[in-house]
Image (cartoon, grey):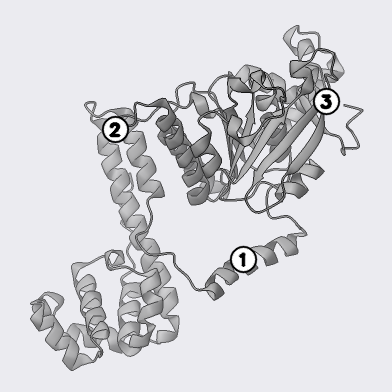
Amino acid sequence: MSNNIPIDEGAERGVLGSLFLEPELYSELSRVVSTDDFSSDKNREIWVSMVECILEGHLDLVVLDAKLKSRKTLDKIGGIKAVVDIVNNTPTSEAAMKYASIVAEYGERRRKLKGLNLAASQIADLGTDISSTDEFIQNVILAPTGKGRTVDFGGAFEEFKKDYDERKARGNTLPGILTGYPDLDIMLGGFEKAKMYVVGGRPSMGKTAYALNIAARMAKSEHMVMYFSLEMGQAELVKRVLGIGTGIPIKKMKTCKLTGEEETKISEYKEKLNKYFLINDTSYQTMAGIMTEVIGKNAELSTSGRHVECVIIDHLQLISASASKYTDRRNQIGEASRMCKIMSKELKIPVIVLSQLSRALKDRTSYTPRLTDLRESGDIEQDADVVILLHRDGYYDPEADQKEAKAYVAKNRDGNTGVVKYSWYKDRNIFAENTDPNCEIM
């Protein structure tokens, strides 16, 4: 663990000097900087005393001197001369917000570094439960900064406008990661940052295949996707992804019947996904462990300027309960669902979660899935921004078209709901959207 403590004394003095010169800046500065962001007791005391003076109606050297004396901290900071030195060496208050952002960032880095050092001590202590340490690390990384995020409409508009302008400059008309499924992308706007997507279906309906189709398409477009498989091993996942990307029947890979041309095709497709499709097949996973894994991978990727852009979890009902948490399974699933939503917001990525549907579905006259068919549906339905329910008539009726598949977008928090139609090629694990010009070829 690094011993380099991030401190910028100059920026801290710049914030203090700017506040003294222009007390009206307090409302803006306080949205960015908190007392804990200052690295020394001296600077924290000067900040607190200035703020108290401002809130009481007036700030100047005489009033501040009296305030410091009343708090019995004047000598601790080096006398009122220390404040005068800070003010005299503040070049301009115009850079106040720049100073503030540096102070806030360094303060946050110090807090996280302190937490991670404590986590390192816990990991080294064999008497500490490792799952508790995972959860602690996750909380350290995702912990809120302690400063409010309330902004006026103008501030919120600036964030919207920045995103809009960046997408427009890139030629992207939709806000999320595109899959190349035209109908799905248009209906959802792509898979957007900070949103939770649930893909539901009965066992053997094709949930994993559908998720792998989406993941493979994202990775092929050079978006970093991290796929957590709690049920299926790496080798099986790889066969399925290769079937999706090359159109080669999976059976030929299982039986080692590939031609030289097909082996070349597989090798070429592997190179396209090599850096962008990350697989974790640990069967025992808690949400704390998943988030710790993603955060760790982001730290590893940061040296190359990359980060995980989408997480897929297969599937929700297999996530293990955190230590010392609920014993009731419904509450455990609700907790896992809520943590998926928090992860999407805090890491600013789409999180796609697969979920089982209730067995009661098979006992109805109509097999068309509904939101209420999600197992432990209350929390999942509430947390999800988008719910996609997979359905194949051929699953229930051997006489029906076995290639026909539908994805019902049953919930879409800020868009349309509806049905996306696919052709399902089981031997190659492919979902081909019916508007896809390659649909009948694959």
- Front residue of 210 and 220: 210
Secondary structure type for disc 3: strand
Secondary structure type for disc 1: helix
Give amino acid for label 1.
Answer: Phe
Q: Looking at the rendering, in which quadrant would you find the N terminus?
A: top left
Q: State left or right for residue 244 relative to residue 55.
A: right
Q: Give the residue at x 9% y 81%.
A: 70
Mark number for residue 404? 3
The CA distance from mark 3 to mark 2 is: 51 Å
Q: Position of residue 92 (x, y in %)?
A: 40, 87
Q: How crowded is mark 3: few (under 14 residues within 10 Å), some or many (20 or more)?
A: some
Q: Circle 1 is placed at which residue position?
A: 160
Q: Circle 2 is placed at which residue position?
A: 123
Is the C-beta separation of discs 2 and 1 under 8 Å? no
Q: Give the residue at x 60% y 26%.
A: 357
Q: Where is residue 155 in the image (x, y as percent from the top left)?
A: 53, 72
Q: Position of residue 107 (x, y in %)?
A: 33, 61
